[in-house]
């Protein structure tokens, strides 16, 4: 199955980013066609920083994807439709250290521009890392945030410049 994508300006994304990321979730993928990993993410955002269109996502150092994010300058965010919720759940609860997520889920990797994304995606953001920052608990202004870290495995935030925005052919341009 080869799904065709077309490139659009990120400003044409009409989805509510709170729903797109927080409700629909995304696959964060880093690596090369020869060696990559993906995981489900539901924390992040889209915006403008340093006059660039950016997205940010967060990855815990305990996740297998973390080493791929550290090693590579490029990553993708793939947004899938609701019919793929089971795949998103699987990719968020299983580690690529222990299972082959692609074989187990039947996802179809697409290798383009040195990045990996998935044919099942409705929207893909190809990103180049431009900044990272570790979440530091001593900087929390709201102490209740620490409840998200019972293991003290604080995320690393990656800010990526969106270098290409792709939508699956047949979908309206802004989704």
Image (tube, rainbow, N blue to C red):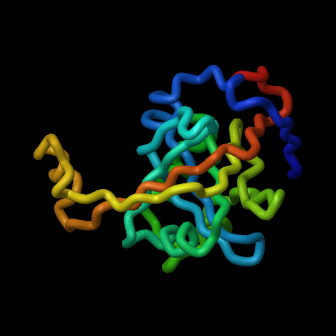
Q: Tell me the residue at 57%/72% (across/down).
A: 68
- Residue 60 left/right relative to 100: left
Q: Position of residue 131 (x, y in %)?
A: 51, 56
Q: Tell me the residue at 75%/57% (across/down).
A: 108
Q: Is residue 37 above or below residue 167?
A: below
- Residue 25 left/right relative to 2: left
Q: Is residue 8 above or below residue 67?
A: above
Q: Position of residue 159 (x, y in %)?
A: 52, 50
Q: Tell me the residue at 19%/57% (across/down).
A: 137
* Residue toward you, 113 or 151: 113
* Residue toward you, 1 or 31: 31
Query: In this orientation, does residue 47 appear?
Result: yes
Res. 28 image quadrant? bottom right
Number of numbered callouts drawn: 0
Q: Is residue 49 above or below residue 106?
A: above
Q: Quadrant of the C terminus?
A: top right
Q: Position of residue 44 (x, y in %)?
A: 45, 43
* Residue toward you, 122 or 134: 134
Q: Position of residue 119 (x, y in %)?
A: 77, 49
Q: Tell me the residue at 56%/33% (across/down).
A: 48
């Amino acid at each position: 199955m080869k799904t065709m994508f077309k490139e659009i300006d990120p400003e044409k994304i009409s989805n509510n980013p709170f729903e797109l990321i927080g409700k629909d979730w995304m696959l964060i993928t880093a690596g090369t066609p020869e060696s990559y990993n993906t995981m489900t993410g539901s924390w992040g955002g889209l915006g403008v920083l340093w006059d660039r269109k950016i997205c940010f996502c967060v990855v815990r150092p305990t996740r297998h994807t973390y080493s791929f994010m550290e090693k590579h300058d490029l990553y993708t965010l793939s947004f899938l439709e609701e019919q793929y919720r089971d795949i998103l759940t699987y990719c968020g609860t299983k580690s690529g250290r222990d299972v082959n997520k692609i074989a187990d889920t039947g996802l179809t990797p697409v290798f383009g521009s040195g990045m990996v994304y998935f044919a099942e995606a409705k929207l893909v953001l190809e990103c180049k890392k431009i900044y990272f920052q570790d979440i530091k608990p001593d900087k929390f202004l709201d102490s209740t945030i620490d409840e998200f870290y019972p293991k003290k495995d604080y995320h690393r935030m990656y800010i990526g410049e969106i270098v290409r925005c792709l939508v699956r052919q047949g979908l309206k341009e802004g989704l």
